[in-house]
Amino acid sequence: MFSRTLRLYAALLLTFCFSVGVNAQQKPNTMGAPNEFVQQVADQILAKLKADSAARSGDIKRVNQIVDEFILPYVNFEKTTRLAAGRNWREATPEQKTALSQAFRGTLARTYSGAFTRVTDSTDIKTLPFRGDANANDVVVKSQVIQRANSQPIALDYRLEKTAQGWKIYDINVENVWLIENYRNQFSQQINQNGIDGLIAALNQRAQ
Amino acid sequence: MNTRTYCKFLLIGLLAILAGCATQQVKTPIAADPWEQSNRAVFEFNDTLDRAIFKPVAQAYAFITPQPVRTCINNIFLNIGSIWAGVNSSLQGRHIDAINTFGRFMLNTTLGLGGCLDLASTTGAKRIPNDFGVTLGVWGISSGPYIVLPIIGASTVRDGTGMIADAYVNQFSYGQAVHDIAVRNSIYGFEVVQRREALLDVTDMVDRTALDRYSFIRDAYLKRRAVQVDGPLSEAESLPSYEDFEAAPADRKALGIPSQK
């Protein structure tokens, strides 16, 4: 009698684990509606972070790794870098363009990670209903991040572009400040002082 | 140490830093920040002070106080502050915002146990931060140059002026509610520690991501304030339109200019 109940519990537990596993494994659909896509990316990474003890205890390196694996594939960081560089982009050689994008990628990863430090069970991201033109190729998806129980939600918006591979995020807005806009002056400052190579070096230095 | 000697030390320290940084040249000036050189000096001063005093105290507070308690206390301070925020929404003619803010205040004060529980946020009513600097902006006063104030930090001439009204109201309301001066001053001190603690995550992120922390904070501050003054615009108006210089060769072709090979 006892063992039968135990077996039933085991079976239930297994089914539960399996279904959770399947949900977490499902890849976000980049071809679907933009707000659903963002929600899927957010759910996927939150599930990962909540299950990871190192990330939960605030290990920033581990959070960076998870962001690298589960968000950056959906980010067009070359476009982000190009727009932040503005007219200086034209002066860059193809090698510099690649190096600059790679260097800025680290900054982007750390920015995204910033939203996910100290994840708790109550951490949640809710995308708001999409109100833009459904056929547009350049859209904004708004979301609210609830970091922990009883705290003020943070407004986090994503700007996405439809590419041949589906939706790609290229800019984010934290509490009314767009990331690209906020890096334009810092980029031009560095370029004016030390050139594009100086900017690349400064970004790489930040990564250490 | 009495207040006067304290102020004297502060002033000497500030002047020393200003003098030390006077040779630093501004290479990429921006129109909104004509006082960049002295602003950077005050920024350095604030930063040193923060690293030496404010941040460690806030971290110690965070270390000894459980997160739910800190969230509760933060919510209580925000809830008290929301009265003045709501008054400012009224002064700006944003009556729906004012009604929302006062509705939030009443719900959180009663069912939310004096503001400890932010029930209004869980029902989807977001907090609408507001102050007298924004009110002055809505009344048509432009922000004036960016200025980094000692200890307080990022501001503009207009917002700094608004802060005098904010501080006066803060003083007055606590003065009415708490008569014991020692208790009142303790509350002020505690509010400073608590506010710094609430910002720890943000400042850590800026430390990790900014290329130049001064520009990062300045640009974010000016942008956020502009959005607060302008109010919720339509999406198309508020979205930045970036010039994309990858498209440049195509434009040349469209203009009939032969592309460079």
Image (cartoon, rainbow, N blue to C red):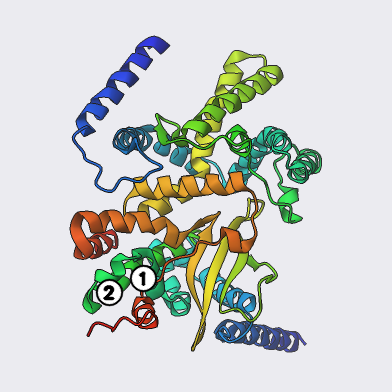
> Which residue is disc 1 drawn over?
A82
Chain under numbered label 1? A
Task: Estimate the spatial distance between the alpha carbons at disc 2 and disc 1, rounded to whole Å.
Answer: 8 Å
Contact between marks 2 and 1 (CB within 8 A): the answer is yes
Circle 1 packing at 10 Å, graded few (<14), some (14-19), many (20+), is: many
* Relative to B2, B112 lies left or right: right
* Relative to B227, B25 lies left or right: left
Looking at the picture, which amino acid does disc 1 mark?
Arg
Circle 2 packing at 10 Å, graded few (<14), some (14-19), many (20+), is: many
* Relative to A27, B81 lies left or right: right
Q: Which mark is residue A97?
A: 2
Q: Examine the image and state in which quarter residue B52 appears.
A: top left
Pointers 2 and 1 within a single chain: yes
Q: Is residue B52 above or below residue A8?
A: above
Element assignment for label 2: helix
Tell me if residue B241 can be seen.
yes
Q: Examine the image and state in which quarter residue A186 appears.
A: bottom left
Looking at the picture, which amino acid does disc 2 mark?
Lys
Chain under numbered label 2? A
Q: Is residue B201 above or below residue B22?
A: below
Element assignment for label 1: helix
Most distant residue in the front direction: B256
